[in-house]
């Protein structure tokens, strides 16, 4: 009886040891990804809105809240609906990989916060804006244009369903990547 108990617990222990690493390797949740975004040099998160409004919904606050397992706040001015939203995991992971795999440096100007068009996917936590790519401000021409276009193509390779930037109405100085 003792040996059977021992065998049973040994089998349990073995299966636990075998399963644990596989689980943790695939279980990078949103909070973990957000923590990685926060500590990755080369991803700058805006601490203010372009509108000048200062609220708890800046890009940095959105990622900090997500890192703490909380929802990201939306702004409450212009077209923004207020309240909060859980950020999309694929969007977050793509933000991280644009730096760690594609080697871009960039500044995220908005995630769920700020005022965008009515019904914008920013309010659903599925889009982020970028104002600077590889040291150049996104612009309608020159290196700011070339680098923005490269960044836009990279967003698409990560499955972005809508990518806007220079050449698209209202996006001459920022890139919008949406999942
Ligand atoms: Zn946008």
Image (spheres, helix red, strand yellow):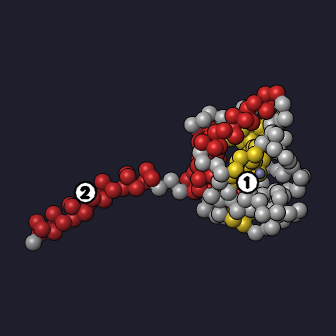
Quarter of the image holding residue 66?
bottom right
Question: Residue at 21% of width from left, 65% of height from top?
Answer: 9
The answer, for residue 113, to whether it is visible in the render is yes
Q: Residue furthest bottom?
A: 1
Q: Is residue 65 left or right of residue 135?
A: left
Residue 43 image position (x, y, % from top left): 68, 41
**Quarter of the rendering containing residue 20:** bottom left
Among the 4 quarters of the image, the one containing residue 82? bottom right
Residue shown at 60%/35% (left/top)?
102
Q: Quadrant of the N terminus?
A: bottom left
- Image quadrant occupied by the C terminus: bottom right
Q: Which mark is residue 77?
A: none
State left or right for residue 160 relative to residue 61.
left
Q: Please tell me whether mark 1 sits on a helix, a strand or a loop.
A: loop
Queried on whether the Cβ of the residue with tag 2 lies below 8 angstroms from ligand 1, the answer reads no
Depth order, front residue of 62/139: 139
Which residue in the structure is indicated by mark 2?
14
* Nearer mark to the viewer, of 1 and 2: 1
As measured in the structure, the alpha-carbon distance from the residue carrying label 1 to the one carrying label 2 is 43 Å
State whether residue 19 is above or below residue 37: below
* Residue 21 left/right relative to 34: left
Q: Which mark is residue 111?
A: 1
Q: Residue at x 73, y 59 (%)?
A: 121
In the image, residue 52 lies at what x, y percent?
90, 52
Q: Residue at x 59, y 45 (%)?
A: 158
Residue furthest top as drawn: 142
Q: Which of the marked residues, 1 or 2, is nearer the chain's N terminus?
A: 2
């Amino acid at each position: 009886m003792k040996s059977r108990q021992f065998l049973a617990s040994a089998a349990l222990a073995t299966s636990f040891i075998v399963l644990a690493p596989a689980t943790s390797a695939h279980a990078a949740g949103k909070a973990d990804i957000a923590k990685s975004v926060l500590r990755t040099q080369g991803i700058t998160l805006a601490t203010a809105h372009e509108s000048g409004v200062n609220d708890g919904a800046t890009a940095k606050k959105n990622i900090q809240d997500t890192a703490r397992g909380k929802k990201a706040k939306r702004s409450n001015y212009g077209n923004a609906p207020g309240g909060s939203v859980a950020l999309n995991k694929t969007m977050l992971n793509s933000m991280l990989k644009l730096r760690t795999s594609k080697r871009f440096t960039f500044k995220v100007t908005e995630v769920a916060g700020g005022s965008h068009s009515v019904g914008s996917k920013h309010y659903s936590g599925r889009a982020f804006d970028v104002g600077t790519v590889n040291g150049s401000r996104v612009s309608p021409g020159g290196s700011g244009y070339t680098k923005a276009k490269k960044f836009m193509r990279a967003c698409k390779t990560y499955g972005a369903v809508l990518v806007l930037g220079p050449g698209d109405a209202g996006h001459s100085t920022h890139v919008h990547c949406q999942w």
